[in-house]
Amino acid sequence: MRWSTEDWHTAGEPFRIVEDLPTDGSTVAERRVHAMTGHPDAVRRFLCLEPRGHDDMYGGFITPADDDGADFGVLFWHKDGFSTACGHGTMALGAWAVRTGRVPAPDDGEATVTIDVPSGRVQARVQREGGRTTGVVFRNVASRVLETGIPLATSAGDVSVDLVYGGAVYATLPAAAVGLSVTPEHTAELIRLGREIKWALDDHPAAQLADARLSGVYGTILVDDLGRTDTGPWQRNVTVFADGEVDRSPCGSGTAARVALLAHTGALADDEVLTHDSIIGTRFLARVAGRTPDGVIPEVTGQAYRVGRCEFELDTGDPLAGGFTLR
């Protein structure tokens, strides 16, 4: 087994890009379902888990688009399987598609990269100056509040949790509600409580969507309120997704979910910008770009950077082809 990857990061969160992996299905959503138990899952484990990756690795398999309306499709993956949405990955893919020439782009101006993902069709608008990419705007699927004020007893006390859809379902609450702040020294406890809350609400009726493939709580977003800037609310968050994986970025689809919630409560007006920081201090800017009957259309702006190319191979007799995890 031998695989070549191109590695990027968006605001500190890794994204490992893999081309030329055969996948079954006529749509990206179908391909995701088939990939969960087939050869792509073995490749995911090989590239994501130790000793070739780690418990917080993230990546995607490039696939054909659903139709001619998109440039390509992608199956997003993490240590526990395949996700339905990924904003930081969409930004990385936009920058990658332009850098590799897969999608033409001007030296000055903007190029739109359209990508089919399991939750729908999204866009990465790649901003260019002097032949360099200076930013990527992730335009997400319609995002909406599912239910607010859900009471939940946790090991850190009773809390009130909101469930919001941003391409995946997120449980969100203030970090202060469990006696924490979103800072690196609290990472272990944030992971523990993020996992606890996710699994406690995974079967909640509000998390069961019309398309069952999108159902269940994908992650928990714990938030610090930092007040306001001149342009709108300022918050810091950590998203604990899958089963205890920590997003180093402010989380693209999680930021979209926060935009939907803040717009719902009136804390984010349509002409304002959410300044959204991560646990490591990186930043996304986000806004409501439009409204539909299915929810708001969030746009999240960040930047992605190429890390390098990797060549992975399975040495003869290596017993760890399937990788391992310690979390």
Image (cartoon, grey):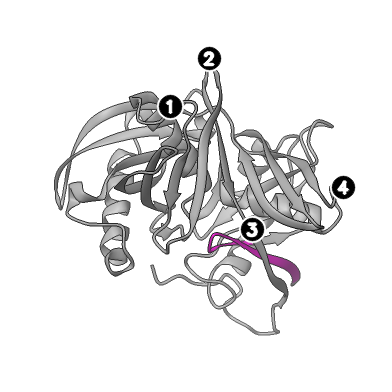
Residue 104: mark in rendering: 4
Secondary structure at badge 2 equals loop
Secondary structure at badge 4 equals loop
Distance Cα–Cα, label 3 vs label 1: 27 Å
Distance Cα–Cα, label 4 vs label 1: 34 Å
Around disc 3, counting alpha carbons within 10 Å, would you say few (fewer than 14), some (14 to 19), or many (20 or more)?
many
Residue 241 x, y percent position in the rendering: 42, 52
Is residue 85 left or right of 135 when viewed as pictured? left
In which quarter of the view is residue 269 placed? top left
Task: Looking at this view, name the residue that lies furthest to the front.
Answer: 230
* Residue marked by disc 2: 293
The magenta-colored residue range is 3-15
* Residue marked by disc 1: 269
Look at discs 4 and 2 and give the one toward the viewer: 4
Q: Could you tell me the amino acid type at mark 3? A: Ala
Q: Quadrant of the C terminus?
A: bottom left
Residue 304: mark in rendering: 3
Cβ–Cβ under 8 Å for marks 3 and 1: no
Distance Cα–Cα, label 4 vs label 3: 18 Å
Q: Quadrant of the N terminus?
A: bottom right
Is residue 163 left or right of 79 when viewed as pictured? left
Look at discs 3 and 1 and give the one toward the viewer: 1
Around disc 1, counting alpha carbons within 10 Å, would you say few (fewer than 14), some (14 to 19), or many (20 or more)?
some
Secondary structure at badge 3 equals strand
Residue 69 x, y percent position in the rendering: 80, 30
Task: Looking at this view, name the residue that lies furthest to the top.
Answer: 293
